[in-house]
Amino acid sequence: MEFSDNMSGQDMEKAYNESFNEVEENTLIEATVIDVSDDTVFLDFGGKSEAKIATTEFDSRPKAGDVVTVYLIKQEGSDGDPIVSKRKADSIMEKKEVYDLLKNKKCAEGIVKEANKNGFIIQYKNLKGFISFRKFDLAKIENPQQYIGKKVGFYVDRVFDDTDQNGKNSKFKRTEDFSGNRIGFILHERDQKRKEFLEDKHEGDIVEGVVRGIKSFGAFIDLGGIEALLPIRDISYAHIDKVEDVLKVGDKVTVKILKLKREEGRVSVGMKQALPDPWTQFIEKYKVGDVVKGKVATLTTFGAFITVMDGVEGLLHISDMSWTKNIKSPAELLSKGQQVEVMIIGIDNEAKRFNLSLKHLMSNPWDEAAKKYKVGTTVQCKVKDIVSFGVFVELEDGIDALLHRDDISWNNDVGDLHSKYKVGDMIEAVVIQFDEAHNKIKVGVKQLSGDPWLSASSKCKKGEPVEVTVQAIDPERGVIVAIVENVTTLIPFSQLGIGRIDEIKSTVKDDFKPGDKVKALVLDFDMAKRFVKLSIREYMKKEEFSKIEQYMDNGGNANVSYTIGDALKSKEEENK
């Protein structure tokens, strides 16, 4: 620039300022690197002074002569130097790229950095984008953390910035730079793959896929661009109750294309068809009557399916499990995974089914039971179950009998059966009935010995004394005594002695001990009703009266002293 001698100072200053490039603040400018120190890059963009910027704003260290794009914030700062930002310029240029992606509907690729309650934060270069869960995948996002760190394709839905692509202020204020849509990308990719699949694949082809969904009737397999149905019947040659027992979402599977409808875009596949049919090997190896070993695969209400070789299962019906046991559920006899030996009793080659039996491996025990357990036979049996009316006992495996509560004791009241017997107890009994027509046996315990009431009847005469044995003390009722073995009765406190009942109760444990022999008077005895009533009190009275009579017969012998009879009289007078 030239200056004339007649120019004023003001004119010279104006001309000097106009000699510099006029650049607008808050815009992108190009600048040349003129020097680089340890922490600062010096730039010349044609301004009054050099611009300075920290080296940390550069991805790689620049060198002198490099031309870089920066953002001019101010022509002059507080120190007179221009204020520029490389980071701001990079951000604006990257956002321009994002605007171009949005405008031209181009696909971009970013990295999932984090997940919040609403969606994912995506990093695209130095920008942050947001993709909501509902726009991220076709399926519901169950575990967002599994996507962290993965590269994903997406389309830009909207750009958010405090400046637009020209650097001007924008009305949008967001922490993210843009929002995206991954579903659009997935659908685009799927459409391309779907088209390729339908053009290239044919029925009978073996393909790889991934389980995407599970239903009660089968599974949906992603074959890459197209979803195929895998019916439950085509998953395995073995019987399957639930798809979940064999497959889970995410499993990789090899399948055979069974049906391919190109016009409708529908595909049906099978897993088992991709494998050799094991039925051919089974039918060649086995026949009806063969005994085979297998493993319980599935339990149902009507039986169990037994795997006899890989992919081949036969039905063991509940009616073919036992000759004798009333099996209500297969679980009573079998458990899943149990190894069993069974007989093949039927094969349907056309339907590819066969029936098995457990009981045909065993002889029917009732054929021998009638000979073995005749009426009157003494048996050793094990308590299996206790019910209100009696006890079920096992004579041998598969042969059970009923011990009715009326056949346990000659005494009418046997009390609580659970306190008398425990499951697993071994007891001795005698067969008292065998019903061959219905395969039922009754046994008795009391029939092992003669009726003790016959012995008791000969021993007990009404009005006569009888010697009994103390069995136990009942603190609430009195003393239990045995007349003969298996015939007991209760002598109440009121009949245990002379005196007040409370006094008798207080000393009963001292006066009567199990095993003691005591005498009592028979007040009543009924053989038919199995009833006997005894009294020690009346026996004592009778004994005293006998002594009094003896005293009188002896003419008042002084050796007969004041006795319990006198005491009784005295007690009775006190109680009046």
Image: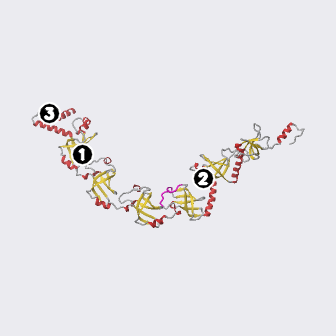
Query: Quick check: marks 1 and 3 in contact, CB under 8 Å?
Result: no
Q: Which residue is mark 2?
A: 137
Distance from label 1 to label 3 (Cα)? Answer: 36 Å
Q: Earlier in the sequence, mark 1 or mark 3?
A: 1
Q: Earlier in the sequence, mark 2 or mark 3?
A: 2
Q: Which label belongs to residue 561?
A: 3
- Decide: few, some or many residues near mark 1? Use Cα within 10 Å; few <14, some 14-19, many ≥20: some
Q: Give amino acid for label 2.
A: Asp
Callout 2 secondary element: loop
Q: Which color scheme did the rendering employ for the protein?
A: secondary structure
Most extreme residue toward the front is 38
Q: Which label belongs to residue 432?
A: none
**Segment tinted magenta in the rendering:** 238-248
Most extreme residue toward the right is 6
Quarter of the view holding residue 316:
bottom left
Is 430 rendered above or below residue 469? Answer: below
Callout 3 secondary element: loop
In the rendering, at what x and y percent does residue 255 appear?
55, 61
Q: Residue at x 44, y 66 (%)?
A: 285
Q: Which residue is mark 1?
A: 488
Q: Give amino acid for label 1.
A: Thr
Q: Earlier in the sequence, mark 2 or mark 1?
A: 2
